[in-house]
Amino acid sequence: MSSHSKSAAVIGAGPAGLMAAEVLAQGGASVTVYDAMPSAGRKFLMAGRGGLNLTHSEALPQFLARYREAMPHLKTAIEAFPPQALRDWSEALGQETFVGSSGRVFPKAFKASPLLRAWLRRLDSMGVKLVLRHRWVGWDEQGRLRFEAHDGAHVVDPCATVLALGGASWPRLGSDGTWTEALAAVGVKISPLRPANSGFTVAWSEIFRDRFEGQPLKGVALTFAAHTQRGEAIVTRTGIEGGAIYALSAELREAIAISGQATLRIALRPDLEQRELIARLSGPRGKQSLSNFLRKAVGLSPVAIGLLQEAAKASGASLASMSPADLAHLINAVPIELDGIAPIARAISTAGGIAFDELDGEFMLKRLPGVFAAGEMLDWEAPTGGYLLQASFATGVAAGRGALRWLNS
């Protein structure tokens, strides 16, 4: 078989695209990876700034359930390249991994940059070419790939193509969602791109916003409808974000899309039962200010007390006039009115994308033989905790294997 008959283009130099390129190169294909950015893996590097959370150590059935309605479509790919395979792959690149106290898996270096550098060296040694500053804009009349670059337009005619262009979050890092236009133009069904693992907007009072912007609410429990999530949230100038918020973001987003708002309830001391809270709040206050009393009796932080005052003000009540029972109830069910979703450019990830019924079992687009898709541009979402990267890597492997079988058929 000639080298041209095994030529493959991968568009997108993130985890899904680079993994597809590796699989193709291992199978003997001549691979070129194209990316619009000046360097590879920019969003991957951003994900590693706080410690690269590669995957999660929980049992596979529970792990797969995190993908909710997309689980049946991702199950085969993740089972074929499960969390342990991702850990083994990382360690083969010289980056040992460990399981954190929350079950999350990190490289021991705790960074993305050493892993990405080692990976790019391996791909280079396998003959994978990396072509940067090339923005894909669709196909021409002959079905060739069209790119825009600093020196003008380029066309490429590979025998197989893997699309791995990401979603639409953090567009300055490369995934800006403009690929939707090229695919919609050829009839591919795409679910609208929406923020996932995102923050929400709240109409804070000016006093609260100015004093507590950037302050964390630690050890809280957030409840919306039937869903409760323990963790941390952070007050922003325009609303609220953080790990516990992200875990509820799908339900909150859909509620806001339907009714324009959602009421989130925050338990500030979820480990204290109502009776214990009432007992503590019934003690003598003496000459202490209410804030000092709440800090000492219940262990509330200044931002938590500020949140109580915001809620009391919104209801037309006064914290100082509340009975211990009413105050105890409020402390563990503070209502926060969310009135919007933070912009998709600020979201950690993206919901929506190419509908799975547009793909065959090899991750090939049914309308475009020889064109495969992987990663966040597919219609799935998952919480933070390693699930996002795991599915991106696994679908990259699946699309790479599918493209290789296409080349060999």
Image (cartoon, helix red, strand yellow):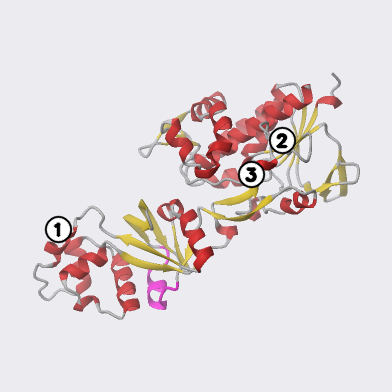
Task: Determine which quarter of the picture holds residue 359.
Answer: top right
Compare marks 2 and 3 and give the one earlier in the sequence.
2
Labels in figure, total: 3
Note whether residue 66 is visible: yes
Residue at mark 1: 276
Note whether residue 40 is visible: no
Residue at mark 3: 378
Assess whether residue 204 is covered by the magenta stretch.
yes
Residue at (78% x, 25% y) in the render:
407
Residue 325 in the image: above or below residue 207: above
Q: Report how far apart the C-alphas of labels 1 and 3 lie in the structure.
A: 48 Å
Instruction: Give the side of residue 14 with respect to residue 210, left or right.
Output: right
Q: In the rendering, which numbered label is found on residue 18?
A: none
The percent position of residue 145, horizontal first and vertical second, equals 83, 42
Task: Please identify, in this view, whether the residue under mark 1 or under mark 2 is nearer the observer.
Answer: 2
At mark 2, the secondary structure is loop
Instruction: Give the side of residue 352 with respect to residue 251, left or right.
Output: right
Residues rendered magenta in the picture? 203-214
Amino acid type, callout 1: Glu
Amino acid type, callout 3: Leu
Answer yes or no: do the residues labelled 1 and 2 have beta carbons within 8 Å? no
Query: Between 79 and 174, which is closer to the camera in this rendering?
Result: 79
Task: Please identify, in this view, whether the residue under mark 1 or under mark 3 is nearer the observer.
Answer: 3
Residue at (53% x, 28% y) in the render:
79
Q: Report how far apart the C-alphas of labels 2 and 3 lie in the structure.
A: 12 Å
Label 2: few (<14), some (14–19) or many (≥20) C-alpha neighbours in 10 Å: many
Q: Report how far apart the C-alphas of labels 1 and 2 lie in the structure.
A: 58 Å
Residue at mark 2: 364
At mark 1, the secondary structure is helix
At mark 3, the secondary structure is loop
Compare marks 1 and 3 and give the one earlier in the sequence.
1
